[in-house]
Image: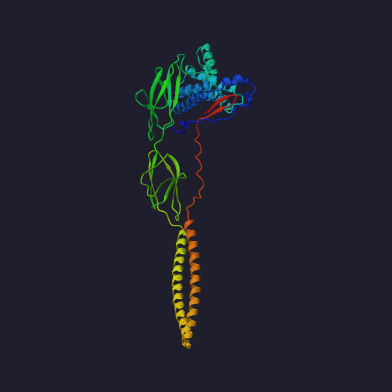
């Protein structure tokens, strides 16, 4: 299944002001309930998947069911497109007539339709084909009248109303089983009896889903099942103690003792450690894929400078100690000579020694003070370089991938009205 069969999330918008003049009570009655809007979305999603799978009759029926729940001219256009393809692949007078009627009803309901030219072009090619049909004119008029009112589950197939389940899933290769029957590719239209039915949906790389769907007599019950993808497994090795972040959220430390579970898709992995260059890599993973990253971090130039400056500080501290020690030694000599001077007169040589000791003490003390200041400054700068060496991610956030082309649905819900727009 391609991206065209992905689920379509409704967008809540303001109601059209062109309906403001209608009676408020009537518009309130026409406004769908949340349950109706949810069923309409399920019908549209199922119809989109059926359309992509080439099940055009089923797709048309689903679009018309969505139109009955939340009326929208664009859903009539989508149903007409599906019936036109149904006639082109499997020629059917009924599908041809209903496609023509739906194109005309689309143009009637929305005179300023965005796809008016496409509808007119389709009519110009289909109307001559209708003229060649030899079917009874009254029967054709009956078909047109049924289609012009929006149709329904019975109108899309036959007059007989049947109880059926319409099961779909956006997962690639999804398969469906009803009440223990063999799995078949989605989408599936299964005739069932009224009441509860056990449904199982599976797809490669996804967790199986089992649910109970209650079928209502005479109705087509849609259920669009979104399967949970199985996570990919990420292992990171490299510099021990580094932090591992996935999409900005810290998840583990290196080396990872257990695999990091990440959802399929594009992710940004960052491995960081203070004093080391940031490791940043964008990875794209699929279901259950095992990914291994080797993040051997390189020490930053700031951290190298910090170690160098701290080394200078340590050397300065050692020099300060040596100089201070020598100054104390000379201070001791000067004190001994001063004590002798107090007891008796010093000889000229002792007086010279005393003066030399005092001068040496002063010089060594000054040198020790300078060395200590340099050591303190070096330690301060080194510690600052060391502490404030945190890795920074300068990369801009990854832009989301462009939306794949395909069917679109726009649910319009406001105070006065509501509608659904489907585009193919």
Q: Which colour scheme is used?
A: rainbow
Q: Is residue 104 visible?
A: no
Asked if residue 240 is positioned above or below residue 247 in the image, the reply reads below
Asked if residue 217 is positioned above or below residue 282 in the image, the reply reads above
Could you say where residue 325 lies in the image, as x and y percent from the top left? Answer: 44, 73
Q: Quadrant of residue 251?
A: top left
Among all residues in the image, which is located at the extreme bottom? 348
Instruction: Work out which quarter of the rendered image holds the N terminus and state it.
Output: top left
> Which of these two is toward me, 389 or 130?
389
Could you say where residue 415 lies in the image, as x and y percent from the top left? Answer: 59, 26
Q: In which quarter of the image is residue 192?
A: top left
Q: Which residue is drawn at 48% across and 72% down?
A: 368
Could you say where residue 114 lies in the image, as x and y percent from the top left? Answer: 58, 28
Side of 205 where 405 appears, left or right: right
Among all residues in the image, which is located at the extreme front? 343
> Which of these two is toward me, 129 or 37?
37
> Which of these two is toward me, 7 or 368?
368
Q: Quadrant of residue 113?
A: top right
Q: Residue at x 48, y 75 (%)?
A: 364
> Which of these two is toward me, 329 or 316?
329
Could you say where residue 276 lies in the image, as x and y percent from the top left? Answer: 44, 55
Q: Can residue 420 be seen in this view?
A: yes
Q: Residue at x 49, y 65 (%)?
A: 376
């Amino acid at each position: 299944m391609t991206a065209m069969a992905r689920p379509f999330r409704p967008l809540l918008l303001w109601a059209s002001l062109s309906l403001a003049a209608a009676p408020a009570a009537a518009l309130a009655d026409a406004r769908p309930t949340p349950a109706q809007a949810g069923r309409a979305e399920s019908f549209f999603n199922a119809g989109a998947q059926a359309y992509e799978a080439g099940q055009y009759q089923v797709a048309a029926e689903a679009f018309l069911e969505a139109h009955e729940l939340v009326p929208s001219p664009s859903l009539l256009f989508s149903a007409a497109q599906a019936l036109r393809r149904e006639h082109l692949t499997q020629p059917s007078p009924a599908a041809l007539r209903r496609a023509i009627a739906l194109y005309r009803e689309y143009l009637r309901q929305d005179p300023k339709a965005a796809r008016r030219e496409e509808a007119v072009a389709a009519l110009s090619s289909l109307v001559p084909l209708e003229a060649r049909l030899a079917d009874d004119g009254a029967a054709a008029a009956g078909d047109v009248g049924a289609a012009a009112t929006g149709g329904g589950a019975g109108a899309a197939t036959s007059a007989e109303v049947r109880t059926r389940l319409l099961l779909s899933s956006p997962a690639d290769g999804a398969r469906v089983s009803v009440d223990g029957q063999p799995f078949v590719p989605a989408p599936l239209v299964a005739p069932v009896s009224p009441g509860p039915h056990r449904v199982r949906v599976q797809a490669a790389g996804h967790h199986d889903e089992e649910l109970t769907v209650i079928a209502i007599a005479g109705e087509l019950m849609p259920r669009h099942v979104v399967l949970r993808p199985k996570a990919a497994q990420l292992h990171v090795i490299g510099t021990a103690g580094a932090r591992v972040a996935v999409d900005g959220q810290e998840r583990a430390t290196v080396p990872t003792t257990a695999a990091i579970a990440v959802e399929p898709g594009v992710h940004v992995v960052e491995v960081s450690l203070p004093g080391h260059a940031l490791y940043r890599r964008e990875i794209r993973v699929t279901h259950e894929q095992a990914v291994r990253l080797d993040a051997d971090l390189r020490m930053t130039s700031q951290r190298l400078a910090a170690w160098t400056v701290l080394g200078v500080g340590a050397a300065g501290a050692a020099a300060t100690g040596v100089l201070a020690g020598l100054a104390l030694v000379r201070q001791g000599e000067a004190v001994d000579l001063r004590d002798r001077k107090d007891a008796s007169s010093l000889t000229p040589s002792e007086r010279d020694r005393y003066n030399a000791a005092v001068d040496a003490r002063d010089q060594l003390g000054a040198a020790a003070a300078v060395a200590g200041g340099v050591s303190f400054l070096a330690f301060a700068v080194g510690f600052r370089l060391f502490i404030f060496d945190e890795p920074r991610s300068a990369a801009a956030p990854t832009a989301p991938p462009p939306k794949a082309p395909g069917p679109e649905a726009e649910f319009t819900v406001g105070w006065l009205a509501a509608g659904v727009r489907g585009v193919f």
